[in-house]
Amino acid sequence: MGMQSSLPLPSWKTVLTQIIFYFILEDFVFYWGHRVLHTKWLYKHVHSVHHEYATPFGLTSEYAHPAEILFLGFATILGPALTGPHLMTLWLWMVVRVLETVEAHCGYHFPWSFSNFLPIYGGADFHDYHHRLLYTKSGNYASTFVYMDWIFGTDKGYRKLKALKSGHMEDSGKEM
Ligand SMILES: [Zn+2]
Ligand SMILES: [Zn+2]
């Protein structure tokens, strides 16, 4: 794959560009792979393991059927396989990708959560919604960003709920 492990280390610009590219590519491939996992047979025999937790916490991000790990792991490895990065970049990518999915499953939306600063980033609130619903009515399939679900209309339920919640909060604010 053209991967290097010798010195000098790549520049931070190369590392950053590659990792941003991996995130975008991973999110795209993951979205479609995850949608396929929500078809009847694959959900019943494979993906339902990951969905045992309707209210996930960090560790459950890696809790899945081995076939799912291989299948969706392909999305993680595709970017590096195409670009042949330095070994350190590959490790860094793996670390940030795991941290990203742990955050998405942590169950807490903090004031300092990444999605507060980067609106295209999904985070815990976005993925929590995915775990709460039945597989046929699910949405929010993307791993990192929100735009894939927005483009393909699989975030409609989530957006509706958000609108209802913010409307409700405004109403209760008026009452006070
Ligand atoms: Zn799912
Ligand atoms: Zn999940």
Image (cartoon, rainbow, N blue to C red):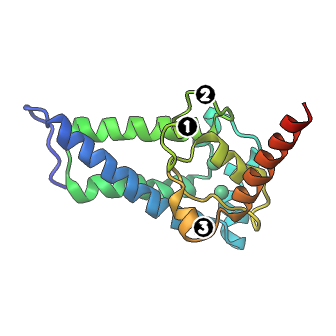
**At 28% across and 52% down in the image, what residue appears?**
80
- Residue highlighted by disc 3: 35
Circle 1 — which element? Answer: helix
Q: Which amino acid does label 1 sit on?
A: Asn
**At 53% across and 52% down in the image, what residue appears?**
143
Is 35 on the left-hand or right-hand side of 15? right
Report how far apart the C-alphas of labels 3 and 2 lie in the structure: 30 Å
Other residues around mark 1 within 10 Å, as few (<14) / some (14–19) / many (≥20): some
- Quarter placement of the C terminus: top right
Residue 58, visible in the rendered structure = yes
Is 3 on the left-hand or right-hand side of 23? left
Q: What residue type is labelled 3?
A: Arg
Depicted 174 relative to depicted 82: above or below: above
Report how far apart the C-alphas of labels 2 and 1 lie in the structure: 7 Å
Circle 2 — which element? Answer: loop
Q: Which of marks 1 and 3 is in front?
A: 1
Is 101 on the left-hand or right-hand side of 39? left
Q: Nearer the viewer, mark 3 or mark 2?
A: 2
- Quarter placement of the N terminus: bottom left
Badge number at residue 111: 2
* Residue 97 rendering spot, x and y as whole percentages: 44, 41
Give the mark nearest the N terminus, 2 or 1: 2
Report how far apart the C-alphas of labels 1 and 3 lie in the structure: 26 Å
Q: Do the residues labelled 2 and 1 touch (CB within 8 Å)?
A: yes
Depicted 138 relative to depicted 170: above or below: below
